[in-house]
Amino acid sequence: MVDFYVSSGPPSSYRMNSFTFEPGGKILLQDQYGLSRFVSGEIPFFDGTVGGDEFAEDKERARRIFNNMRKNRQNEWAVIMIGSQRVNYLVEYMVADLFNCEPFVPANENPKVPVYLCYRNFDHLVPSCFGGQGNPLDKNGEIRHGTYYVDENFEWRFFEWQEGKNDSGIVIIIREADNVELATFGFSGRATNAIGNALLQKSEQFWPEADAVTSNTVVARGKETGIYICRVEFSEDKKNGQASICESFENDVVTIVPLNCKVLEKFLSKGPCRK
C-alpha cells in the first residue's frame, strides 16, 4: 500500500503515481493508479501568515496526521511526501523526528540537521528546523538562496537557485523493516518534477542494491536512512516561456549527491527519535 501526501495538486502532476520497494532494495515508481491510494487536499500548507491561530491550527493538524500516519501503518507500507516544509508541513515533522529537534523551531546554537533551505524573498517564510531566510548557522557572508548540505569535511556546501537556469532539492528515504517513507521536494514545482523523473530513471543512485559493495545509507535506531541532494539544470528549450506544472521537462538534468555517511551518522546519533 502506498500513501501520497502532497501539498497541492494530484500526484500525477509530478509523474509519481505509484511506488514500490522491492526486497532487493530497488525503488520502482510506475504509472499505474491501481497500485496506490492517494491522499490529497488534506495536508495543511502555508497561506502567507506566520503566527496567529490559523498557523497554530495548521501545525497541530499536520502533527495529528503525521502521528496517525506512523501509528496506523501496516507491513509493507510506503509513504511519499511531495513538497518542501514551506508547503507540506508533514516534511517538517518527518525531518524533526529524524534528527531529534523541534519542528518549526530554527536552531539557535549548533546545526541539528545536515541540510538546509535558504528561502527566497518571495517564498512562504515558514519557520523551520532546517530552513529560513538567512544562511545556515556557521555559514557567514552574503545570503545566497538555495540548498545547503554538510560535506565530508563537515563544511557547508551549496547548490544555488538561479531563476530559469538552476534549481535544487532533496530526497529523504527512510526504511524500517518493510516500511518505507520518502520525501521529495525542490525549490520549485519544476525542480520537484525533475527530481521525480530522476527517481524514475536513476533509482539505483537513490538506494543501493542489496549486494552493493558501498552504501550511501546509514542504519541507526532500527532505521536505514539515505539523504540525497539534487542539483537541477534546466534544459535550454524550456528556459524561456511559461512553465506548466503538467509538463514533464524530461530534458532537465539532475545531479545526485548522496549525503556523506559519516556526516549523516553523526547527526543521527545526537539523540533518540522524538515521541
Image (spheres, rainbow, N blue to C red):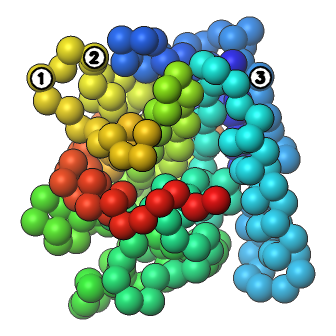
Question: What percent of the width, then of the height, locates residue 32?
Answer: 65, 10
Q: Quadrant of the N terminus?
A: top right
Kind of residue sitting beneath label 1: Val
Which residue carries the number 1 mark?
213
Question: Around disc 1, counting alpha carbons within 10 Å, would you say few (fewer than 14), some (14 to 19), or many (20 or more)?
Answer: few
For the C terminus, the image quarter is bottom right
Task: Name which residue lies at 84% across and 44% down.
Answer: 41
Q: Distance from label 1 to label 3 (Cα)? A: 35 Å
Residue 274: where, in percent of width, then height? 58, 61
Identify the residue at horizontal 28%, vertical 17% (top origin).
210
> Mark 2 belongs to which amino acid?
Ala
Name the residue tied to disc 3: 37
Q: Is residue 90 above or below residue 176?
A: below
Between the residue at mark 1 and the residue at mark 2, the CA separation in whole angstroms equals 9 Å
Where is residue 120? Give x, y as percent: 49, 74
Q: Residues within 10 Å of mark 3 (few under 14, many from 20)?
A: few
For marks 3 and 2 on the same chain, the one whose residue lies earlier in the sequence = 3
* In the displayed structure image, the side of residue 185 where residue 69 appears, left or right: right
What element does badge 3 sit on? strand
Q: Is residue 50 at all visible to an observer of this figure?
A: yes
Q: How far is the residue under mark 3 from the one under mark 2?
A: 28 Å
> Which residue is nearer to you in this view: 111 or 253?
111
Front of the two marks 1 and 3: 1
C-beta proximity under 8 Å, tags 1 and 2: no
Vertical placement of residue 188 versus 145, above or below = above
SS at circle 1: loop
The disc at residue 210 is 2
The earlier-in-sequence mark between 1 and 3 is 3
**Is 62 drawn above or below residue 76 in the view shown?**
below
Kindly identify the residue that appears in the image at 14 percent across and 29 percent down.
214
